[in-house]
Image: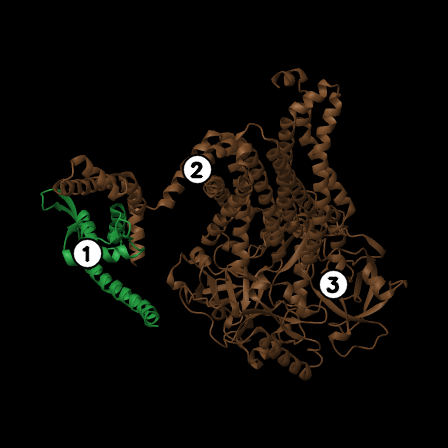
Chain colours: A brown, B green
Amino acid sequence: MRKLRALWMRVGGLFRFKGADGEFSAELESHVAMHVEDGVRAGLSEEEARRQAMIRLGGLEQTKIAYRERQGLPWFETLWQDVRFGMRMLAKSPGFTIVAVLTLGLGIGANTALFSVVNGVLLNPLPYPHADELVTVHASKPNFSEGSISYLNFRDWQRDNKTLAALAVSRGTGFNLTGMGDAEEVRAELVSSDFFALLGVKPVIGRLFAPHEDEVGREPLVMISEGFWARKFGSRPDAVGRVLTLDGRDYTIVGVVPVNFDLQINNFRASDIYVPIGQFRNPALNYRAAGLGIHGIARLKPGVTLEQAKADMKQVSERLEQIYPEADQGIRAKLVPFKYEMVRNVKPLLLILMGAVGFVLLIACVNIANLLLVRSNARAQEFAVRSALGAGRVRLVRQLLTESLMLSLLGGALGLALASWGTKLLLRLLPEQLPRAADVHVSGAVLCFTLAVSLGAGTLFGLMPALRIFKQNLQDALKEGSRSATGSRQRVQSWLVVFQMATTLVLLAGAGLMIRSLMKLSEVDTGFQTRGVLTFGLQPTPTMINQGPDAERAYLREANARIAAIPGVDAVSFSWAALPMLSDDEDLFWLDGEAKPQNQAGMHWAIRYIVEPGYLPAMGIRLRKGRFLAASDDEHAQRAVVIDEVFARKFFGNADPIGKQIHLEQYDDPATVVGVVGHVNQWGLDNDAVNPLRAEIYQAMMQLPEQQLRLTMMGMDTVVHSRYNAEATFKSIQSAVAQMNHEQVVYNPESMEAAIAYTLTGRRFTMILLATFAGAALLLASIGLYGVISYLVAQHAREIGVRMALGADRRDVFRWVLVCGGKLAVFGAVAGVLAALALTQVIARFSSLLYGVHAYDPWTMAGVTLVMMVVALAACYLPARRAMEIDPMQVLRTE
Amino acid sequence: MGNKTDVWQGTLALMVLKTLEAMGPIHGYGIARRIEQTSGNLLSLNYGTLYPALLKLEQEGFVASEWGLSENNRKAKFYKLTRAGRKQLEREARDWEQATAILARFLSPAEEA
């Protein structure tokens, strides 16, 4: 405490020592006067008495200095001195200062921006109480490691487990909202009762769903989002208890979910409407083997480890497998920690980018170190003089470090400003699906990071010239134009440039591999046309629900005809299953001649497309053999299916598949293969080829069994091909559909081109950033090389002049300079290629960013090396020209 | 002057505090003279070092100062012990006595032998 008080007073002393100085002078004066008086009284002359007094005091000034040092904080005063001196030095060479601060600002800014993303996404804890207890739950199946959970299994898992405090499920859906202005499609989530309680969500008003309210056959209830509450009910509290008409059914509002609730996990997205899962009107809900897109979340009991929970859930699923061998064969609960689930796709990407941007800053630091080295040489005399006047080397180093830290802090401040802007830009560029984007902002941690990076950078580039002071020979430096010091500094600079070149090459290689991957991907054959294809959702009027199969088929035919009649529309098809790149669905079957398998595990799998005849022309899929589904493949005709070439090769080999029969699991009657079409890329450009499930089967919508046909009335996809642009087409479709019935809605239009581009956003983002970083690195490194070579030429001007005077050819001089620079570039390239080979392996191993290229892709390596060499030689060109234009006469004259 | 001892590090503060306790409010010159007298003129005190020491004690809150008039009607800065300073004096005196007692034990048997 005493120490602290003293420190505080000394800090205070810093700012008022001028007044206090006067006071102490007065005190000393009175001291001396009293001493003199005593001396005179003892018989000394006044002069002698004063002399004695001074001796005993130990000098007036010395005492004042000792007093002043105690009064303020001497180290702080020296620091302040250094800072003021440093500011003068920086102001004296504004060009250097501006270049250095800008370079650093950009480097630190890019680092800060990316770090704030990394910090928000990867480092910040999740905004839920005891978030480390949260896991997502899936059903692992022979074909899917993280498949959906059937409703009945969910209930049994919920009941039988001993390690989970709560287990809840959700599934996305959509409702046709009527009775509140225009009919509209609202996105909704079906959830089990525990869902919000498990996450610690508190309702704004009203209540959450109570236990058992989520069971089948209960009264229809609904929770709404705060935004929806404000939009539709003006945030009035009496909204609770009122009724929403969804798909023609009345749901009572029980509570409002707060606006800050945002969760993106599994397929769950925060929505406007939440309905208990028991209201899911799909008969398959009571079918234990059904995969209905239901996924779970759970909270571990306090003190339970993930391993214990996994073991417990394994036991639970094994027991169910014994009880239901047919439906639960091979099905296991799978637990994945929340945070891992949220970030696993972006983690490697962010870490790679973070590494890359770190390299850029390193290169920037090296540039500034090189600039400072040149300056320190120019200032060698200044330092020599100061050291001759008694300044310690530590003191000089401290001053140099102060200067470089000031530079880096200025750069850091600029960087922070750039980062707050750059973070927004990054988020706009980032793949939309970036989890936790809302958690990204410039926070305290980010500020600390920026400060640490600035100080680290400042020390790094400041230390290099500073350390030279220790090695410097004073006498040499005092004498004009010392050679030995220049030589060693030249060597240090050269190595720094080699290091820059190598680092740049690594970044170039990374960017090059990304560009090659994207090129390869753009060459991938999708199997369908992308131009002019538009998909959207169609939700018939709620009155269509439960009207019977004949009315439903009649509706489908009429709606199809209405859309087909729109000008510009060439082909149209409804679709109720998988859609390439957008949604997936599977079918199980066995071949004719095989015994009917005991359970699903024994059956074959294929991707299922349930479509209409217009699908083939709308998507531009190639017909290989036989015919596609036709209008005549209806409820009265024999069951017909069309398969793709992958299916044909896999299950029929070289035999002609036309006319072959297969048994689909959900039908009693066999289906006949009537045609073979080209393979369509279902899983995305980069993933389709490696997906184990690639066989595709097309079935006619009109041949759907009654139960499933009924479900189409709750919403289905539509695919059209139009000669006009997507927006205009969708507008005409909207009006045509509303004309047919104003209670039905079309929603969520998406062009196939956009869907494909979307699958590549993550890669494109990485490519753009890596290329930007690599470009910045290349620019910085070439500036560094340019600086070093220019300096070399300036240093050797005399020598060059003499050589020319002795008859050396100008071209020889030019070549000599280029060779000097080229040597550095070659060293850098060799080191860089070696480093790149190691680091690109890391990219290949820990991320799926590379497609169709090896980490050591020779073309890429050769290409980027070439680019770097060309740029390096270009950087040497100007100094080489300058060397060539040296006038030997002038040089000799100044000698 | 030859057989005078320099003031040991760290003991000056204790001497100042003790002097202030004995003398009451007193100026810097008086403290210096008093310390010399008390030591029987065996200590050689550099008067200049007294003032930073006084400043330190003041910063730590053990002494307080104010301007006043000396016995010869000269303007001088007077120092006096604060309550915290009194406690500090007790503490330091106790520590010092303990330290000297320990050292004495080491030294006395050697004399007897």
Amino acid type assigned to the residue bearing label 1 in the image: Thr
Sequence order check, earlier mark of 2 and 3: 2
Q: CA distance from mark 1 to mark 2?
A: 41 Å
| Apparent side of residue A768 relative to residue A219 in the rendered image (left or right) | right
Residue under numbered circle 3 = A607
Asked if one can make out residue A185 in the rendered structure from this viewpoint, the answer is no
Q: Nearer the viewer, residue B80 or A633?
A: B80
Which residue is the site of mark 2? A390
State left or right for residue A438 relative to residue A688: left
Image coordinates of residue A719 in percent, x first then y, are: 68, 53
Q: Amino acid at mark 2?
A: Gly
Q: Is residue A101 visible?
A: yes
- The chain identifier of the residue carrying mark 2 reads A
According to the picture, the residue beneath numbered tag 1 turns out to be: B38
Q: Are marks 1 and 2 on the same chain?
A: no
Disc 3 residue type (three-letter): Ile
Chain under numbered label 3: A
Question: In the image shown, does A522 or A4 lie closer to the viewer?
Answer: A4
In the image, residue A254 sits, relative to residue A851, either above or below, namely below
Q: Nearer the viewer, residue A95 or B102?
A: B102
Q: Locate the N terminus of chain A by quadrant.
A: bottom left
Q: Residues within 10 Å of mark 3 (few under 14, many from 20)?
A: many
Question: Rounded to the nearest whole Å, what is the CA distance between mark 1 and mark 3?
Answer: 105 Å
Q: Nearer the viewer, mark 2 or mark 3?
A: 2
